Image: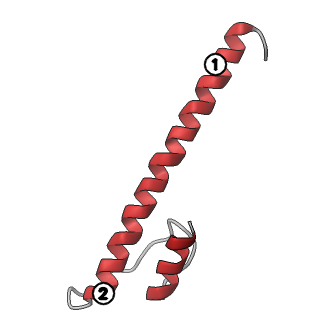
Amino acid sequence: MRRITWLRRLIGVDQRPFAPIPKRPRSHTRYNRIAAEIQLLEHGLVGYLAGVNRDLQRRIRIRKSKGKW
């Protein structure tokens, strides 16, 4: 998460994760490379959080079926 914030600060956009990143012309190679890395990291974060959510839903379902909830 810190890396995403740092990269966003580096290119001068909103530092909150998942905030939109403005498009720049193709000539802004460094900006576009950093923006692509941010998108890759945020995509991985979404995948991780989806896995956590899936595990928590499974635990709730199991506990309810055993009558422990």
Residue 48, above or below 31: above
Extreme residue in the left direction: 26
Quadrant in the picture for the C terminus: top right
In the rendered structure, which amino acid carries the disc numbered 2? Arg
Horizontal side, residue 44 vs residue 65: left or right: left
Residue 32, above or below 66: below
The reply to whether discs 1 and 2 touch (Cβ–Cβ < 8 Å) is no
Local SS, label 1: helix
Q: Position of residue 44 (x, y in %)?
A: 43, 54
Number of other residues with Cα within 10 Å of mark 1, as a class: few under 14, some 14 to 19, many 20 or more: few
State how far apart marks 1 and 2 are (Cα).
47 Å
User: Picture quarter containing residue 63?
Assistant: top right
Horizontal side, residue 39 vs residue 32: left or right: right
Extreme residue in the front direction: 3
Q: Give the residue drawn at x 45%, y 47%.
A: 47
In the rendered structure, which amino acid carries the disc numbered 1? Arg
Q: Give the residue drawn at x 34%, y 85%.
A: 31
Horizontal side, residue 40 vs residue 66: left or right: left
Q: Position of residue 18 (x, y in %)?
A: 50, 65
Q: Position of residue 37 (x, y in %)?
A: 36, 70
Residue 9, above or below 54: below
Report the disc number at residue 44. none
Local SS, label 2: helix
Of marks 1 and 2, the one in the foreground: 2
Residues 1 and 32: in front is 1
Q: Give the residue drawn at x 71%, y 8%.
A: 66
- Residue tagged 2: 30
Indicate the colouring scheme: secondary structure
- Residue tagged 1: 61
User: Picture quarter containing residue 32?
Assistant: bottom left
Quadrant in the picture for the N terminus: bottom right
